[in-house]
Amino acid sequence: MGNTWTTRAETGADIAAVRAINLAAFPTPAEADLVDTLRADPTAWLDGLSLVAVDEADRPVGHALLTRCHIDAVPALCLAPCAVRPEHQRSGAGAAAVRAALAAARSAGEHHVVVLGHPAYYPRFGFTRASAHGIGLTVDVPDEALMALSLDDGHPLPGGTVRFAAPFGI
């Protein structure tokens, strides 16, 4: 399939496949369990913001999830987790799922996204260091690992402390 991937919103029929993607991509089952835990939390889960990249047979091979968080009192989204089956890594499946998730968030009227992630990966989507916008956490992480993105020019990123959904444990 190369670098051209079809993406779509996750459906109930995809739950097992998304779990398999996360089990294959993350080093521990606890990390893979995060999606199931978020799915069960009505304050974190937002319908339509769990996106999959699928192969020619419509089987999910990549997954990106946006969940509710807040920057102080301002509603925002958190991009986490993003995973790809090992045999499809570096094929563009993850990037396609992330782009589709960000597009779905824009369409849903969301304005801000934060991510704790690899500083060499997420800037390609427009993420910048959160600290440059006065955004931080209550726990220590490398400055370059917390990034933020405004989904539209009309809503600049607010400063403040990110509060993640309870399943993140932060």
Image (tube, grey):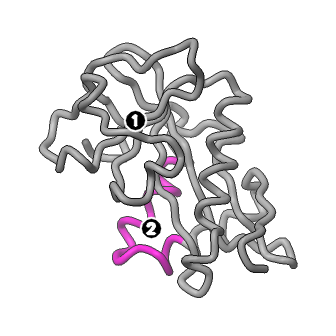
| x and y percentages locating residue 64 in the rendered image | 58, 55
Is 122 rendered above or below residue 160? below
| x and y percentages locating residue 92 in the rendered image | 63, 69
Which residue is the extreme one toward the left?
140
Q: Residue at x 47, y 76 (%)?
A: 25
User: Disc 1 designates what residue?
Assistant: 148
Alpha carbon distance from label 2 to label 1: 23 Å
Report if the CB atoms under discs 2 and 1 are less than 8 Å apart: no
Which residue type does callout 1 highlight?
Answer: Ala
Q: Quadrant of residue 135?
A: top left
Is 157 rendered above or below residue 129? above
Q: Quadrant of residue 74?
A: top left
Count residues near mark 2 (Cα–Cα under 10 Å), then give few for <14, some for 14-19, many for 20+. Answer: many
Is 13 rendered above or below residue 153? below
Q: Residue at x 38, y 65 (%)?
A: 31
Which residue is the extreme one toward the bottom?
87
Near-viewer residue (148 or 69): 148
Of helix, strand and loop, which mostly describes the magenta segment? helix
Q: Residue at x 31, y 30 (%)?
A: 163
Q: Magenta segment: does it hold 21?
A: no
Q: Which residues are magenta?
A: 22-38
User: Disc 2 designates what residue?
Assistant: 32
Q: Which mark is residue 118?
A: none
Which residue type does callout 2 highlight?
Answer: Ala
| x and y percentages locating residue 80 in the rendered image | 46, 51
| x and y percentages locating residue 162 in the rendered image | 30, 29
